[in-house]
Amino acid sequence: MKNLHRKQEGSMNIIIVGCGKIGQNLAEQLDEEGNNITVVDISPEKVQEISTRLDVMGVVGNGATHAIQQEAGIDDADLLIAVTGSDELNLLCCIVARKSGHCHAIARVKQPEYSTEASYLKDELGLAMVINPQYAAAEEIARVLRFPSAMKIDTFAGGRVELVKFRLPVDSPLVGMSVREMAAQLHPDVLICTVERDAEAYIAKGDLVFEGKDVISLIASPKSAADFFTKISYRTRSVKDVIIAGGGKTAHYLCDMLLRDGMAVKIIEKEARVCEELCTLFPDATVIHGNAGDQEILIEEGIERTGAFVALTNMDEENILLSLFAKRVGKGKLVTKINRFDFSDLVDQLDLDSIIYPKNIASDVIVRYIRAMKNTIGSNVETLYNVIKGKVEASEFIVKEGSLITGKPLSELAFKKNVLIASILRGQKVIIPRGQDCILPGDHVVIVSELMGLHDITDVLR
Amino acid sequence: MNYRMITYILGWILLFEAGFLLVPSLTALIYGEQAVKSFLLSIAICVVVSALLIFKKPKNTSLRSRDGFVIVSLSWIVLSLFGAIPFMLTGATTSFVDALFETVSGFTTTGASIFNNVDILPRSILMWRSFTHWVGGMGVLVFIMAFLPLSGGRNMYIMRAESPGPSVSKLVPRVRTTALLLYGIYFALTLLEFVILLCGGMSAFDALNTAFATAGTGGFAPHSDSMNGFSPFLQVVVGVFMLLFSLNFSSYFLVLKGRFKDSFTCEIRTFLVIVAAAVTVITLNIRGMFSTVGEALRHAFFTVSSIISTTGFATVDFNLWPQLSRAILVLLMFIGACAGSTGGGIKVSRIIIYFKTAVRELRTAIHPKQVKKITMDGKPVEQTVVRSSLVFLVCFMLVFVCSVLIVSIDNYDLPTNFTAVAATINNIGPGLNAVGPTYNFAFFSPLSKLVLIFDMLAGRLELLPMLLLFAPTTWKKS
């Protein structure tokens, strides 16, 4: 009886403490993947709302107490994720969970003071993971600034394969070309995976013709990706100087990363106290005390000529407006942070280069970790990304000895519809597969498909 | 309003009903009855209509709160309409209203009948009557929604609308697993009762029918004299099982998990105290009517258990009992079973909330600034739950009063009208006087029967879904 609701294949019992933005996002994603979720929050309304919307169980109370954790089923839980607004509470939740159950624990920690001690905390408290949403967001921003052609970059196989998303300019030479013609003319070492057009998503077939403003996802090694963008002469110049609007925590982390990359960083912040703090910490950065919402200041600080403009204020609306302005007056790369807004379709239409959703990034990082955890209990997905949310996924598998997919040329295998073998990593070599290539045991294979929730690479075979 | 999705789900309901109808068909086949043709024809009708509705899966499968309520009430209506077909085809009754009354009474686990003499009915019809109890007891929709591959499991609206009690919570995170656990407990308890009855000397047919009718807390018995013809041992067994089926099912889950202390909730304790008190008073009150105290105790226990669990079996004609006992029984009708059981009535947990709210209100009169939360089992009861419980009582009174008024047009005496409505809206079955345990509901006019049908459905679905069906705002576009 006790085991009746235990694992079906690949399902885990997960407790999420804190039903804020990240908690809700996590519950939604993990629920969709077939895990048994229990959410805990001190507010009955939040618990009520989320347990009506999703197939999860709700417990009202303080998630750091043993009694509430028991009620949420800590004894049978595989994982507890503490994502309340308070770092201390999150850490306490995890400590209690580690002492009372046999489950793994993940804590959200956002204060820079704790964050710098993340690995110490992780080791000493026996946590599986410490996640800092602002830091993760800053990392993602830094990644797109290093490679400004992309709207978004995800990495496979420890960074040796990249999934790059970019928007095709209307005047690009690719417009009007089909995927096959493009391959014949340019011989690029990249694989076009998906094309998004007018809120529709297509898995790229040979006869698909590119149009202006298409959002294209491609898979390649970092070097081939750079070569490809040079060939199609699309904004390959790397960013030298950045203007950051808003001096919050994300800006703090980002500034640190960018300075280390040797970029010139300018931060506009309206609070004098924060400005002083920033300029003490980062003497190399230019800190401007002023309101980023003021056009004159923006023009004076060179928004027209800057290589990149990053809007990181606390107001989503302000960020969007600032980026729209920067787009009108300048040519630089734009990055916009959006915390709360749920109108992602609308924002995507504004054509603002890269949009960063910290809450999604944090939950993505956690979900990715959980997938790796599941690896040990059945499924063997290594990493997994939503290429297009809810429609197309990219998953990385390590091929096992004796798998049905090995040893035959790809052209001889019967794949399901809309499956793309996007890349094969053998040792250090990245292969963009063609029909005559074979998959061998030990290969890392990236598959892009419309099939959700793949557990094994053979799931793509008919 | 997602009409396409609603009809799609109704189609599935009919397909399941066709499956349910296999049970009486099989009975007819075993006993070589003519009725088998009628049942097979009914199945064919269900399958054809269902096929038309589920032929194409709708694109938009999202359900809003109001869709959930409409689906629940329409499902029960459709289930009853099609479930009435066999009664007509076999010629058990010639009036469709009567056939519908009998089916609704079955699915809502009321057990009020329009048949004078059930001993002359085909066995397959008797089996269909009891089986509707068993199906209706736990509710069909949650079961179907949990196993139908049509939505991402966002069916809490439906689960809330169909399950009895002021607040519904899941046992485990997934609706599907929760449903599986609940139906598992339900099935196991039914099986246990069947086996004990069989060992106690009941025939297999009677034992199966009785077990079905007890499990759903229904009350259709395979004989006209209800449980009177069975041995005292069997009566006690049925009496105990009626009580077991009127306890909160999640408590059984907690017992299985080894959390005995948590399983003995405030609601169950109150329920048992009420039962014990009622049995004691009635035993003392009716002692003179029986030769021994033991016999009086047995009948008092059985009757109290039958009424408070809202089953409606009878071992004696309690209509002949002294006024005090009769009054107690009518009160028990309104209290009803525990939330989260198969029983009807207002539910013990709501009664507790009413009592505590009243006490709090009186206290605030004395200490106007006092802040006090209503708690149950050491946990605060949310103000929204208190509010909806109070609104439930108001709606209940409203429906009740209107029903009594309409039924009174037939010009029978007040206890008859009053208890007829009480016995149907609380899903019990027999009332007092002309609707007492030895009589039936056949004599009412079709209008009264329709009102009572509405009461049975409204009572089983806890008013809201049925009332919303008639609210104009439900059908407005936005």
Image (cartoon, rainbow, N blue to C red):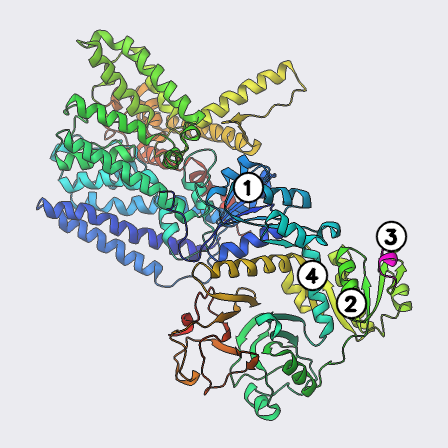
Q: Earlier in the sequence, mark 1 or mark 4?
A: 1
Residue type for callout 2: Leu
Which is nearer the N-term, disc 2 or disc 4?
A: 4
Does residue B227 lie above or below A61 as drawn?
above
Image spot of residue B45 (x, y percent): 24, 54
Question: With respect to residue A451, does B455 lie above or below?
Answer: above
Residue range (magenta): A277-283
Q: Disc 3 versus disc 4: distance between alpha carbons?
A: 22 Å
Q: Which residue is mark 4?
A: A137
Foreground residue among A349 and A359: A359
**Residue A246, image x and y in percent?**
81, 58
| Whole-number angstrom distance, CA of label 3 to CA of label 1 | 43 Å
Residue at screen point 48% across, 35% down: B167
Residue at the spot of label 2: A258
Residue at 43 percent across and 68 percent down: it is A456
Chain holding disc 4: A
Mark in front: 1 vs 4: 1
Question: Label 1: how many residues lie within 10 Å, few (<14), some (14-19) or many (20+)?
Answer: few
Secondary structure at badge 4 equals helix
Residue A237 in the image, given as x and y percentages of width and height: 76, 80
Determine the main secondary structure of the stretch shown in magenta. helix
Q: Is residue A333 visible?
A: yes
Mark 4 Cα within 10 Å, few/some/many (few <14, many 20+)? many
